[in-house]
Amino acid sequence: MAGSGNAHLRKGDNVLQIQDLVVEFKVSGGTVKAVSGISLDVQRGETLGIVGESGCGKSTTGRAIMQLPSPTSGSIVFEGDELTSMKNADVRAARTKVQMIFQDPVSSLNPRRTVRDSVLEPLEIWKRGTKEEREKLIDDTLESVGIDPARAAESRPHEFSGGQCQRISVARALVLDPTLIICDEPVSALDVSVQAQVLNLLEDLKEKYGLTLVFIAHDLAVVKNISDRVAVMYLGKLCEVASSDALYAHPAHPYTNLLIDSIPEPNPDADHTLGEVIGEPPSPVNPPAGCRFHPRCPYATAECSVDEPRLREIGAGHFVACHNPVTVTH
């Protein structure tokens, strides 16, 4: 199956390892095959970027790691523990070490609570420390993300900008001292200048707190700047997995090339012609046979419509699921 196989999985200090993950949803017209048998790993201190167009299954993958909801099948091992077979109480406890930052920073915060109370709530739920210790931790955490604790004590989310609300969401994710943070398109709703500030903040906090990150986005340029390793998804499958630099310099899958071609270049003399692509993405309720990208791929052959390619290594740490990989210099 395209994007299936475990050839790209590594041995070593893996904080997270996903194998053969399947997530499906029943709808009136059938079954949405949101994620179809993908495997990924994230090593300690690493940032894994997951990129793809809307509807490819990247956010569903992030939520499945959190068991929100539990996947249809597959294995999710976090720090040696299999999350999919845990009891509900154990899953809740595990979530204190796996936190999530959501796409819309304003709606992810309770509008009726002060910002300080929103950040304090996880500590109260899990009864962490004394009241004085909690107050100090909240102050330190808010200051570390660039928010004045005094203002946060009285203000509510609507009184802050989108960028400030995302900083507050980061602070809320940090207070329980997590090992892994899943960032679900955390900058897509922000202005470009604010995006850079939040990305730099995440890099600084990753170093300060020893974090491991899964960074989900549809913008390959953003993912390149923050990720150590990148996985490209299309219609619930993995297309390509490689280091950030290798993926950007030598994209091998036609879909990856298309994503890179779509990155705006601030040069009026540059060639802004997109690579050839045919039609619209197929329905995840009835995905095509063979390679799922073949109906839109300019390099597709008869084989592509019948046999699903598996991830295979074409360079050091560079894996692609394609019968006819290409390399284009951008």
Image: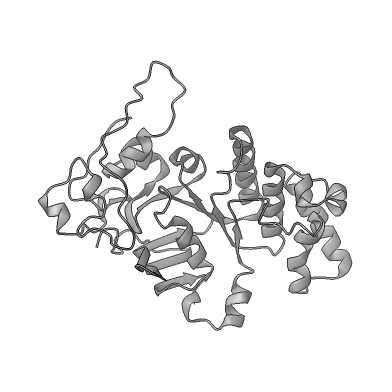
Residue 203 position, x and y percent, is 60, 45
In the shown orientation, is residue 249 left or right of residue 96? left
In x, y percent, where is residue 114? 82, 56
The quarter of the image holding the N terminus is bottom left
Does residue 263 lie above or below 17 as drawn?
above
Q: What residue is rendered at 25% in x and 37% in y?
A: 327
Which of the pair 280/104 is nearer the observer?
280
Residue 9, quarter of picture: bottom left
Question: Would residue 312 appear left or right of 46 to someone viewing this image?
Answer: left
Q: Quadrant of residue 5?
A: bottom left
**Residue 82 appears in the picture as rendered:** no
In the image, residue 12 above or below residue 196: below
Q: Give the farthest residue toward the bottom.
A: 87
- Confirm whether residue 62 shows in the render: yes
Q: Which residue: 60% across, 38% down? A: 195
Closer to us: 253 or 137: 253
Q: Does 302 sit left or right of 98 as displayed?
A: left
Up-down relation of residue 62 to residue 314 (above or below): below
Looking at this view, name the residue that lies furthest to the top. 269
Q: Residue furthest front?
A: 28
* Quadrant in the picture for residue 286: bottom left
133 sits to left or right of 32: right
Q: Position of residue 64 (x, y in %)?
A: 48, 67
Residue 156 at x, y percent in the picture: 80, 52
Q: Quadrant of the C terminus?
A: top left
| 180 or 196: nearer the viewer | 196
